[in-house]
Amino acid sequence: MKKTKMFQVWKRLLSYIAGRHKALFGTVVVCILISSGTVVVSSLFLEILIDNYIMPLLLEQNPSFAPLLRTIVIMGCIYMVGVLSTFLYNKIMVKISQGTLKEIRDDMFEHMQELPIGYFDTHTHGDVMSHYTNDTDTLRQFISQALPQFISAVVTVVVILVSMFLSSVPLTLLVIAVTTVMEFLSQKIGGSSAKYFIKQQITLGNVTGYIEEMINGQKVIKVFCHEEEAKQGFDEKNNTLCDDATKANKFGNILMPVIMQLGNLQYVLLALIGGLLALHGVGNVTVGMIVAFLNLSKTYCMPVSQIAQQISMMAMALAGAERIFRLIDEQPEKDSGDVTLVHVNNNNGVYEEAENRDGIWAWKCPDGSGSFKYVPLKGEIRFEDVDFGYTDKKLVLHCINLWANEGQKIAFVGATGAGKTTITNLINRFYDLNDGKIFYDNINIERIRKKDLRHSMGVVLQDVNLFTGTIMENIRYGNLSATDEECIAASKLANAHDFIMRLPNGYDTVLTQNGASLSQGQRQLISIARAAVANPPVMILDEATSSIDTRTESLVQQGMDNLMKGRTVFVIAHRLSTVRNSDAIMVLDQGRIIERGSHDELIDKKGVYYSLYTGAFELS
């Protein structure tokens, strides 16, 4: 990480720590100043104690120890103040660190909801999860431990350095000379450590992503006896992590002992030179001054060692923070739409916004003069010369033209990779077009706010995602304001009600691990019920019945027909029997529509669809 970028990350991290917790952080700084001040004052008290009390008492025949006792009590009080200050700022830093981590996780998760689908297509789930676990854990250690120690060390070094200059310039210059060597070694060794700590965080994210992928695919690994290959892949990534972590910690562990030994060498030199100066009466050096200076130098080396010790932790924290901020800085999904979805009442052709959900759906379109016009939502979709590619270098859809009138059922068939799912992704605006236009009720979908556009559509995907919670909560996910009765009605529509009632707790049955206790067909039925409760005017069914056996499919087909009645529906299916009753069937090949028409029309043409339907060749 370049120094400029490291400074930016450091500055941004401090804005979370100090900027959002000003009062608490200010209290911490005050406590650190008090704690550091007591260290210096107690050391200077040694000089007074020895020169003004102990040495004179040694020369008296009947010494009075009362003044000495008072001085010791004062020193004890000073130490107590330092202990209380240290306890207080460490306790406050725990609160600041946990509050900061909460805010960072909140910002990450909130921003993650605004990221486009493309981001999750190009980043493994494990690597994304690593931001919330490994990266934030490095920040926790840094904020609660390393940062207060670093601030305390810096303040202590400055205060002690000033005190030593006031006591003896020659001895202070010796301390500075040894400290310069320490600083040089800290930069050389610490710089190497920081580089590998950054690599360690990156490779740790890769390992986490690989583990997450292997756990999800454990059944496939077992079925194809791929255990050894999985181990080999993990070993390669784990070895890379081991190498980076070893190099990072090797430099980090070397640094502290080197600094400590230099500090011991400095202590010996100070005692030797200070003793010689005292014996020859140079610079008014006294025994008390030497003892105090030795104590100050030892105290001075300790924070310098702490600074060196915290460099590795700071490097790791900055590496984690940089990854976190990179996620937060990812470009959110762009949305310049100004057309919104509302409910309206129709009073003799005059539309007025309804205060509740009893009215009909309509698009609220600004007319440029400060007022609005309302366009009833019918579900008419039209593609005009649409080109699209996930990258600019390669198009996957070429000149797509199609239309779906209100209440029509449009089916897409074709080989895997022909572009069927991509078309439905464009309707939802998960991706933006390279060229062409898509109209929704004669409104360019680029004008429609994405949230409202997607709210007007129900989607049933091939891969079902069920969340931890009851079956009722999973169905209600399609419409959070739906009542229990509406959820049950949606389940009956999808023919899911019977099997749900046979479960131990019915609709209150708790699902975990993506509904692992249910069969694939049962999970799909719940997904269909979830789409039904949303009651949208447009439905997209992406291989919705592909995971359902023939018997279950016959049970659900009637519910699906009821669900599609009166709605514009886009169906993707490999089972051609499910698309026979479609108003129009689009046959795609390599991103182009090569045939279109009703089932009977395409059969009469005896083209590609005829060959697919009669089994002359199969979809791949």
Image: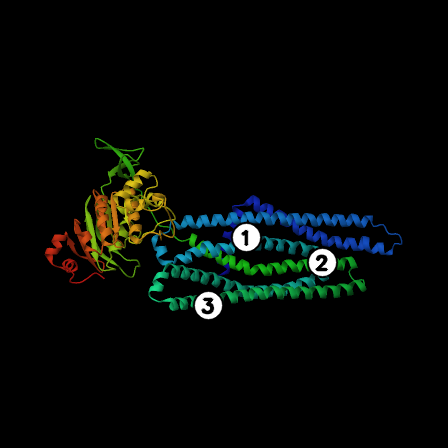
Residue 449 seen in this snapshot: no
**Residue beneath disc 2:** 295
The answer to which of 190 and 2 lies nearer the viewer is 190
Q: Residue 243 at x, y = what percent?
A: 49, 68
**Residue beneath disc 1:** 143
Real-space CA distance between mark 2 and mark 1, rounded to the nearest whole angstrom: 29 Å
From the viewer's perspective, is the residue at label 2 or at label 1 nearer?
1
Query: Within 10 Å of the Cα at label 3, are there few (<14), some (14-19), or many (20+) other Cα atoms?
Result: few
Please, which colouring scheme is shown? rainbow
Residue 477's mark? none
Q: Are marks 1 and 3 in contact (CB under 8 Å)?
A: no
Residue 473 seen in this snapshot: yes
Q: What's the residue at 28%, 42% (across, down)? A: 490
Taking the view exactly as shown, the residue that stands out farthest to the left is: 604
Earlier along the polypeptide chain: callout 2 or callout 1? 1
Taking the view exactly as shown, the residue that stands out farthest to the right is: 61
Instruction: State left or right for residue 403 relative to residue 265.
Output: left
